[in-house]
Image: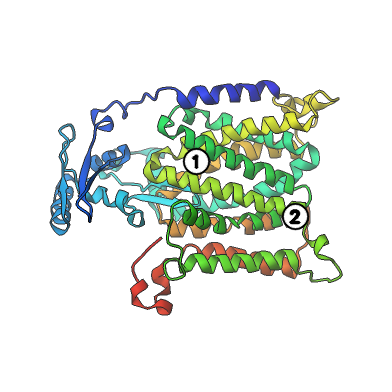
Amino acid sequence: MIRYNLLVSTLIPIILFAPKNNAFSSHPASSLTFGSEIKAPFGTSTTFPLPAYKIQKLHRKDKSKCVSHATRTTSDTNTKTKQDEFVDAPASLVFYDNVLDESIEDGVVCARGVCVLEWVDDESEEEELSGLSKLKNDFLNSYIGPRSLLFGASILYGTNFPLGAIMNDAFVPSAATSARMFLAALALSPFLFKLDPKLSKSALLCGCFTALGYTTQSIALQTISPATVAFLGCATVLVCPTLAALIDKKDMSLKSAPQTWLAAILCLVGVGILELYDPNGGQSLQDLIGIGDFLAILQAIGFGTSFFITERMMRGQPDQALPITAVQVSVSAFISFLWVLADGWLGTQGAENYGIPNLFFQPTFLNQAALAVAFTGFITTALNRFVETTALGKMSSAEASVILATEPLFAAFFTSLWLGEQFGINDYVGGALIVAACLANTLKPSDFAFVFGDDNATEKR
């Protein structure tokens, strides 16, 4: 175990800070200023660089449409544009609208901290496809295809909680988390080389908060129900808006963000019922709330902060979804190794059986815990993120968020199925309110026009 974690920890700084070299970044346009001078209200002007993915998207679009849109947009606004001599297309303001006003992101789909480019169909490429490639393309372009993929991803995410409890029963929690993160980092390691060096520091910081989420989740699973851990993890609906208000100074007033206030109320009431209401009676507050509950909330803070940082990075460069994820799990693997060292069980009798590859060569390899390590590492952590990013490009952010909100429901289902756990009325009511909070967060201010009037009808995030 020491050997593989040292390998991960050694590779991370080398990969993150190595010069990036790929075919697209070598294009002259990707390293030159391609911007638009925007006249500010007080007479100043600012040049906003166009991200590489937007240049790439520009070339995929019909240029005649871009020219028409550029002419119309420029005539409607007091804007000057500058033409880049290396790019055979207009410097249209249509692409800068996304930079100036995040509420109208064009071609970028974000859900739960992950942003990807909206899929742009190329009819000429479709005609050349055949066999399995055509079948795959038809599936992804269908209505049911990407939605079934994301729904499947949500189901797999839900299995993480009961499987984590199974691993904790067989291994030391630090060993289980370390093995899982190592396998995920190994599977996603090819994407590390594609990380934009400018994102290195932010990705490392994001990885630290991701590690906080995974470690506290693993410890919480020792003392409370996996379903409860999953439901309390949904408190990210409170964490992300709070960070947006504190760091981005985003207007979170009741009129500007009513969906956030509704989500917060539903989440707090749901958590209160889940944690404080005892349907059988006779338990004190100290019996109802323990260290496991606190750690489950800390899990939400870790993952919520990670989602917040990740989305800020990916909004500017949504083509970096998988490289950023690779950094997150690699940093989590390294911090899990530090947790292993702090636990002090290394060097004790039988400790070598907890490490990789020894874990998979024991006579008990086919037991549930060993399979859970491989499944959560390769499938629900690594492959699932790849599936998620593929599906997100084919639907709206709101629709994707609704599908992913079903994760704790599947966590509860598999906890009951695999662990035989029984739920009380407080679990059903509290869990339903928390899921409703996740769904409420997908609404827009315009959906509350019947309360605040037409002044709130413009769509905001």
Q: Mark 1 or mark 2, which is nearer the start of the sequence?
A: 2
Above or below, 316 against 338 in this view is below
On residue 416, the disc is none
Q: Is residue 406 left or right of residue 426?
A: left
Find residue 245 and report its horizontal and vertical position in percent: 47, 57
Find residue 129 and report its horizontal and vertical position in percent: 33, 39
Kindly give the residue lying farthest to the front in the view shown.
Answer: 42
Instruction: Looking at the picture, tell me which residue is in the foreground, 453 or 86.
Output: 453
* Amino acid at pointer 2: Ser
Q: Is residue 231 left or right of residue 444?
A: right
Q: How far apart are labels 2 and 1 at the CA level?
A: 28 Å
Q: Which residue is mark 2?
A: 225
* Amino acid at pointer 1: Phe
Density class for disc 1 (Cα within 10 Å; few <14, some 14-19, many ≥20) is some
Say if residue 135 shows up in the picture: no
Q: Residue at x 44, y 31 (%)?
A: 195
Say if residue 6 shows up in the picture: yes
Corner quadrant of residue 253: bottom left
Q: Residue at x 62, y 52 (%)?
A: 300
Q: Which residue is mark 1?
A: 386
Q: Residue at x 73, y 48 (%)?
A: 220
